[in-house]
Image (cartoon, rainbow, N blue to C red):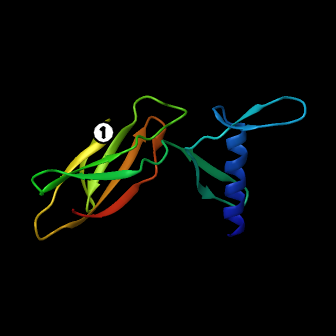
Amino acid sequence: MTTREKIAVGTVALLSVAAIGAGTTAVSDSSPSATIPAPLNLRAYEVGTDYVKVSFGPSIVGPLQIAPSPNGRSAKITWGGATDELYPLGITYEFSKDGTILWSGRQQTYATVGFTRTVRSFSTCVVPHSTSGFGPKRCVTWTAP
């Protein structure tokens, strides 16, 4: 880990402690419990010698699951929704198959994909979007059942 990465990790940790939200519980002698926020959507995207730029957006989606249709030529891909502690409403998703965006801007947490008898392997990616930005991309490569 480089010095810049260590600074970024430390800065994100400090911002996490200073942010407002629910998270883990810590115990001390003076109080029975205190809430320490644990935002899931902070990430350092640029680290300089004397600065760190941090962005925030929805958390990563997942896990992705596949359910084949009875006809054997398509499947339904589902995923757990992303969360955004700063802007909890209005999370939309972008769905792509083999690098091509099939749809974007929908709030649904599923997509139906087709495949052929000869081409049975494909990859799908989901990117969450909200008012605060975009979340990390989650991709899975599937072999059709």
Question: Residue at label 1?
Answer: 105
Q: Which residue type does callout 1 highlight?
A: Gly
Residue that sits furthest to the front in the current view: 70
4 shown above or below 39:
below
Along the horizontal axis of the image, is 119 left or right of 134?
left
Residue that sits furthest to the right in the current view: 29
Q: How many marks?
A: 1
Residue 74 x, y percent position in the rendering = 15, 54
> For numbered disc 1, what is the local secondary structure?
strand
Q: Nearer the viewer, residue 73 or 123?
A: 73
Along the horizontal axis of the image, is 102 left or right of 50?
left
8 shown above or below 110:
below
Residue 103 x, y percent position in the rendering = 24, 46
- Residue occupying image coordinates x 77% and y 31%: 34
Q: Nearer the viewer, residue 89 or 76?
A: 76
Residue 30 x, y percent position in the rendering = 90, 30
Along the horizontal axis of the image, is 48 left or right of 94?
right
State the quadrant of the N terminus.
Answer: bottom right
- Residue occupying image coordinates x 31% and y 46%: 78
Residue 21 x, y percent position in the rendering = 63, 32
- Residue occupying image coordinates x 32% and y 41%: 109
140 shown above or below 15:
below
